[in-house]
Image (spheres, helix red, strand yellow):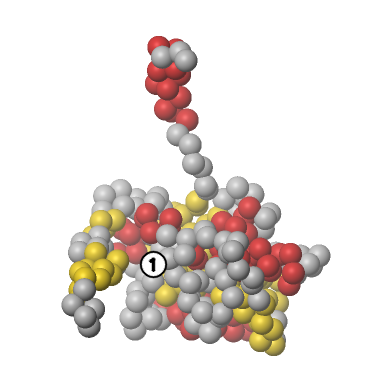
Amino acid sequence: MRILLTNDDGIDAPGITILAESLKKNGHDIIVVAPDKEQSATSHSITLHQPLRIHDRGDKRFAVTGSPADCIILAEKIVLKDDEVDLVISGINGGQNMGEDMLYSGTVAAALEAMFLGFRAMAVSLASYSNQKFETAAYFVNKMLNSGLHELIDSKEIFNVNVPNVELGEIAGMRITEVGHRKYQDFVKEQKDPRGRKIYWIGGAAPLWDKIGNTDFKAISENFISITPVTPSFYKKDSYPKLEKWVEENKI
């Protein structure tokens, strides 16, 4: 297949590099359009108030001076032009993208932007920030593509894939999962700058994950690959009746 790769860790990050090489070895034609530097937790931001640049790194690799969503937009409009791709993969991200963290994730946002533009897309993350085994995730991405997983992606969804950070033989299998829930502890750290003034860092200790139900975290904790179908629905239809009743009772 012809596959567009992007990420939020930057074009030189090990995850996207290892995935690109692995996919090439399996016969796929790879184009990389990724941020020129780390853009983690940029969510679905796009750059409106400053110009963007595309740097040709050679071998179908392009570095963009913007967010992951910017990368997809410029890939579609400038790099690819009228050329088609069969699939967009965002990743392999260094660190999980589960639960509410998907809302902050530039990795997931890039896949969603690709979906908005009409591409089949998936986000792939490795569930660890240390001693990362990207080869495990890359191996299983190839295996899933060989088995036709990408063909199941509908026009209004992406697949969010999280892979346990273990050796190949330790992967227990795959699970189709729901979005989990997490709670961060010590989310804001207070410190002082060299002049004694207070400063704050967002991002604290490792999150506590809800293990109830068929969640992405539960799958990862049991060494299963988590595949979550995600669609961006921003309204709650079952709230209509109570709101319609309120409107009738409070006519303006």
**Label 1 element class:** loop
Q: Residues within 10 Å of mark 1 (few under 14, many from 20)?
A: many
The residue located at (45%, 24%) in the rendering is 240
Most foreground residue, 230 or 46: 46
The residue located at (63%, 53%) in the rendering is 116
Rendering coords of residue 198 (x, y %): 21, 70
**Screen quadrant of the N terminus:** bottom right
Q: Is residue 124 above or below residue 157?
A: below
The residue carrying mark 1 is 96
In the picture, measured across the screen, residue 121 lies left or right of residue 251, that is right
Q: Is residue 71 above or below residue 114?
A: below
Rendering coords of residue 232 (x, y %): 52, 47
Q: Is residue 65 visible?
A: yes
Q: Amino acid at mark 1?
A: Gln
Q: Is residue 147 visible?
A: no
Most foreground residue, 141 or 200: 200
In the picture, measured across the screen, residue 187 lies left or right of residue 160, that is left
Rendering coords of residue 76 (x, y %): 71, 64
Numbered-mark total: 1
Most foreground residue, 139 or 157: 157
Q: Is residue 1 above or below residue 48?
A: below
Rendering coords of residue 222 (x, y %): 30, 64
The residue located at (47%, 61%) in the rendering is 43
Pick out the residue farthest to the front: 195
The residue located at (50%, 51%) in the rendering is 230
Pick out the residue farthest to the bottom: 58
